[in-house]
Structure formats: structure tokens, C-alpha cells
Amino acid sequence: MDPGMHLYIDRFRAQELREEAARRRLARGHEPPPAWSAGAHALGWLLVELGLRLVRVPGPAGHHPYP
């Protein structure tokens, strides 16, 4: 199968999932999240990734940080 086809299928499925989530949200009476929440969500994951990089401290080869 062409690699581009995998990307197409993934994008199509992602769109289906977004539409289903929107339908369920509307059925329960929830309003869509505010526009700024996407940026806050991305910032949160950026901080998580940064924290994980800071915690992982590379040491010399063969050295274990915890005895």
C-alpha cells in the first residue's frame, strides 16, 4: 500500500472522530471549548515534554543514577 494512503486514512479517521466527539458534546448540551483552550492544551504538553527532558539526565556510560 502506498505510504500516502496510510496518511489519508489516518486523516480521514481523525476527522470522523472529531465529528463524533462534537456530536456527543452537543447531544449532552456542552458548548464547544473556547478558542484559547487549544493553545493552553498545547502549552501544557510542551511543559510536560520539557519537564521529562529535564528529569532525564544523561550520565557517563555504564553509570546508573540509582544504586
Image (cartoon, rainbow, N blue to C red):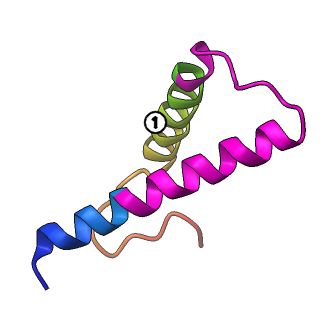
| 63 lies above or below 11 | below
State the residue in front, 67 or 46.
Answer: 46
**Amino acid of disc 1:** Leu
| 3 lies above or below 60 | below
Residue in view at x 62 percent, y 21 percent: 37
Is residue 61 toward the left or the right of residue 39 in the image? left
Is residue 37 toward the left or the right of residue 10 in the image? right
State the residue in front, 20 or 46.
Answer: 20
Q: Quadrant of residue 60?
A: bottom left
**Residue carrying label 1:** 50
State which region is magenta. Answer: 12-38
Residue sitting at the far bottom: 1
Residue in view at x 89 percent, y 41 percent: 28
Residue in view at x 79 percent, y 37 percent: 26
Image label count:
1
**Does 15 lie within the magenta span?**
yes
| Residue 54 image point, x, y percent | 46, 40
Disc 1: CA contacts within 10 A as few (<14), some (14-19) or many (>=20) = few
| Residue 29 image point, x, y percent | 89, 32
**Does 25 lie within the magenta span?**
yes
Is residue 8 toward the left or the right of residue 15 in the image? left
Q: Quadrant of residue 4?
A: bottom left
| 52 lies above or below 16 | above
Quadrant where the N terminus sits is: bottom left
Residue in view at x 59 percent, y 73 percent: 67
State the residue in front, 24 or 41.
Answer: 24
Magenta span dominant secondary structure: helix
Element under label 1? helix
